[in-house]
Image (tube, helix red, strand yellow):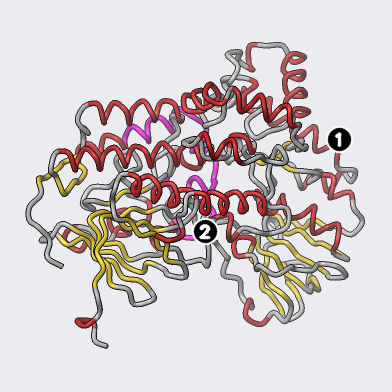
Amino acid sequence: MTESQLEVQHFDAVVVGAGFSGLYMLYKLRELGYSVRVYEAAEDVGGTWYHNRYPGARCDIESIYYNYTFSEELLNEWTWSQRFAEQPEILDYINFVANRLDLRRDIQFKTRITAARYNENYHFWEIDTDTGNLLTASYFITALGCLSASNTPNIKGMDCFKGEMYHTGKWPHEEVRFKGKRVGVIGTGSSGIQAIPIIAKEASSLTVFQRTPQYSTPAQNHAYDPEYIRQIRNNYSEIKKAMSESRHGVPSFPREELAIEVSPDVRKQAYEKAWQEGGLFTLLYQFSDLGFGENANETAQDFIRSKIREIVQDPEVADKLMPSFFYGTKRPIIDTNYFETYNRENVTLVDIKNTPIMEITPTGLKTEETEFELDMIVFATGFDAITGPFFKMDIRGKGGVPLKEKWAGGANLKTYLGLATAGFPNMFMITGPQSPSVLSNMIVSIEQHVEWIADFLEYLRKNNHDEFDVAPPAEEAWSEQCREITEMTLLPKTDSWYMGANIEGKPRGFLAFAGGVGLYRQICNDVAAKGYEGFITLPASRAMNL
């Protein structure tokens, strides 16, 4: 069949991705009467939580805050088992929502969007898939997930390794067995820190190849008490309000005290209390200057390093585990017995910053100093974050300009509110670049974006407009505001995946909005209240004949 003979399907909106973002966008628009189709490359719903099923994978936001809040029925019908839910439980929750809201009937699985082009004559998007579908849509909405483009470093000899090789972001569905095997884990970010203690318990030997030591604090995970869950449900409206007004999308706020103004004893007591309490932002919230002042931040660094020295019995290993960047300038990491794992006799730590990996051999891995015999290699090397998922598609706006070219790979990144970008009409980005996204509880940011997009579409429909674009001055101003806020913090002083520093050749630049969830929401609400200031909208031009 020729292309001209293929049926072209048209939708009011095409959504890319069936994770938390895509599912809520589908539900919201369907409730408003729009025709919507979601395209998902995987075999089922889940997004990040469908693929990231490595040992120890769990959420770093407390379960009771890491769920949809738009439906009281969903809140009351689902009960989390523990403080920090494991991947299988989170995936079960996503499936529960998809079933409860009957979402799968509007999702096409095992289908990847390969290209999307804006047609300026007809004011819609032309979309290609890897299954041959030809689509048009009035609105093109990306729900890609900020951490969905896995990053595997290009190491010499990877194709010749005779053992098993895995990436934490592309973990197989079948069980991976470590018992009796010599395992190497490359990477000590969040996924590595979660997986390493689990693998160490089963493997005959575990060699951890570490480039950058990390600050990690205890999760202090535990099962939920039914009475506690009941209290949370009874007060969830207040909790939701606090999350929406907070810095990071959790119902907690930094203490007003400054670390540099209190006594060393007061600081130590505060940090020790946070260590025992556990949680993602608990230690960072002990003082309000930790994210801004170098001297204040140093006090938190010193505390965590002192804890590593207490826990790790071998002083030489402890020294290798000492981080030196500003605490909190990478997403904080929480763990269960991570540093304790280095006291096991079957665990070895290798510093690959001083002795880099030279190649992977048929039987293992070789650094500048030593060759390691391995049966299995696990890459815990993270993602090409935030912009990476966009560049896996050929997205072209006005004049056929590629998005990758417009953003210059991230170096010239410009958006408006992290929701849209000039020259790409009728395209929305859920938790896109220059929004709070990865700095926050993603569910809070997702819900805010989805609801804002739905309201904007209703505004366009009410006013008989069929096209919007971003006014370039608004985009310039927003991007400059993002830069100015970031420069007030310590965030750009660290090479992190926030900055694109984990990807070889990726231009450096801070990729999120650092002003906090509450401030961001207020800005977005103000834009809407002013008739969607900063956007250019055009009236409906013609009836479509497809």
* Residue underneath mark 1: 310
Q: Earlier in the sequence, mark 2 or mark 1?
A: 2
Q: Which residues are magenta?
A: 480-509
Is residue 256 in view?
Answer: yes
- The answer to whether 516 is drawn above or below residue 289 in the figure is below
> Circle 1 sits in a helix, a strand or a loop, which is it?
helix
Question: Is 535 or 387 nearer to us in this picture?
Answer: 535
Where residue 231 sits, quadrant-wise, is top right
Image location of residue 235, percent across then percent down:
58, 22
Q: Is residue 354 left or right of residue 99?
A: right
At horizontal 36% and vertical 50% (from top left) the residue drawn is: 411
In the picture, which quadrant includes the N terminus?
bottom left
- The answer to whether 234 is drawn above or below residue 358 in the figure is above
The verdict on residue 492 being magenta is: yes
At horizontal 59% and vertical 24% (from top left) the residue drawn is: 252
Q: Which mark, residue 45?
A: 2
In the picture, which quadrant includes the C terminus?
bottom left
Q: Which mark, residue 455?
A: none
Image location of residue 70, percent across then percent down:
46, 36
Image location of residue 424, percent across then percent down:
23, 53
Question: Is 149 or 491 nearer to us in this picture?
Answer: 149
At horizontal 52% and vertical 34% (from top left) the residue drawn is: 72
Residue lying furthest bottom in this view? 1
Q: Categorize mark 1 by other alpha carbons within 10 Å: few (<14), some (14-19), many (20+).
A: few
Is residue 471 in view?
Answer: no
Q: How many marks?
A: 2
Q: Categorize mark 2 by other alpha carbons within 10 Å: few (<14), some (14-19), many (20+).
A: many
Q: Is residue 200 left or right of residue 192?
A: right
